[in-house]
Image (cartoon, rainbow, N blue to C red):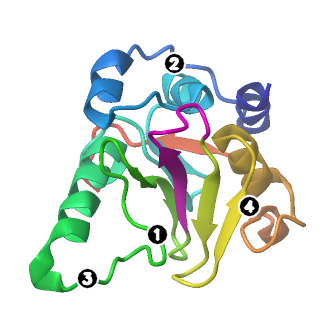
Amino acid sequence: MWVERVIELTGWEPLGISEDWAAVEEELGVPLPPDYKELYEAFGGGVFSECVHFMGRDEGVAFDFLAQWRVSLAVDRDSSLGSVSAVEPYAIYAPGGTGLVPWGATEWADEYFWMIDAGQPGDHSVLARADGGTWHRYAMSISEFLYRVLADPAFLPFGIARYGLDATFEPASGADA
């Protein structure tokens, strides 16, 4: 339902991308949110409204959520950097554990993650923070969160509709931007 709303809002023609989700989920050790897969299959990775980055698969490192997760996990586990996590008080998800996986960001340094708990597969809360500040937890799907960011001016602090930006989508086109 929410994926269709994002498609209608942007006037996008779904791409019908095929992905080997079994391989991705095997690496993570948990199933991905079904609506994330639907969003990716419809849009691929790219930018909504010229400012909201949506990470997909294989669109270059900047738009590949798996590549971003691997880098974040390596940094989170690097003892030479100390014991502080970039996502305090959380940690980046490690297979079999509990933690965050990035799936989006904005030009204004907002960050979007889903919380994965290997002990509770299928529960994918959205966690977001504005410009490195306070964390906000949403018991909603990624597609509902994205729709509200794009269309709901009262969805604070993340709604961009209050800025009068058109709801558009620009695919990453394989760029390493």
> Which residue matches tag 1?
90
How far separated are the C-alphas under marks 3 and 2?
42 Å
- The mark closer to the camera, 3 or 2, is 3
Q: From the viewer's perspective, tell me whether residue 162 is left or right of residue 36.
A: right
| Among the two numbered marks 1 and 2 on one chain, the one whose residue lies closer to the N terminus | 2
Q: Position of residue 29 (x, y in %)?
A: 33, 32
How far separated are the C-alphas under marks 4 and 2?
23 Å
| Along the line of sight, the residue nearer the viewer: 63 or 175 | 63
Indicate the secondary structure of the residue bearing disc 1.
loop
Indicate the secondary structure of the residue bearing disc 3.
loop
> Which residue matches tag 3?
83
The N terminus, quarter of image: top right
- Residue 165 bears which disc, if any? 4
Where does the magenta region start and end? 111-123
Q: Position of residue 33 (x, y in %)?
A: 56, 32
| Among the two numbered marks 4 and 2 on one chain, the one whose residue lies closer to the N terminus | 2
Residue type, mark 4 in image? Leu
Q: Position of residue 60 (x, y in %)?
A: 25, 44
| Along the line of sight, the residue nearer the viewer: 69 or 157 | 69
Asked if one can make out residue 89 in the rendered structure from this viewpoint, the answer is yes
Q: From the viewer's perspective, tell me whether residue 37 is left or right of residue 166.
A: left
| Among the two numbered marks 3 and 1 on one chain, the one whose residue lies closer to the N terminus | 3
Q: Position of residue 21 (x, y in %)?
A: 37, 20
How far separated are the C-alphas under marks 4 and 3?
40 Å
What residue is rendered at 23% in x and 51% in y?
70
Q: From the viewer's perspective, tell me whether residue 91 is left or right of residue 82.
A: right
- The mark closer to the camera, 4 or 1, is 1
Callout 1 touching callout 2 (CB < 8 Å): no
Q: Residues within 10 Å of mark 3 (few under 14, many from 20)?
A: few
- The mark closer to the camera, 1 or 2, is 1
Asked if one can make out residue 167 in the rendered structure from this viewpoint, the answer is no
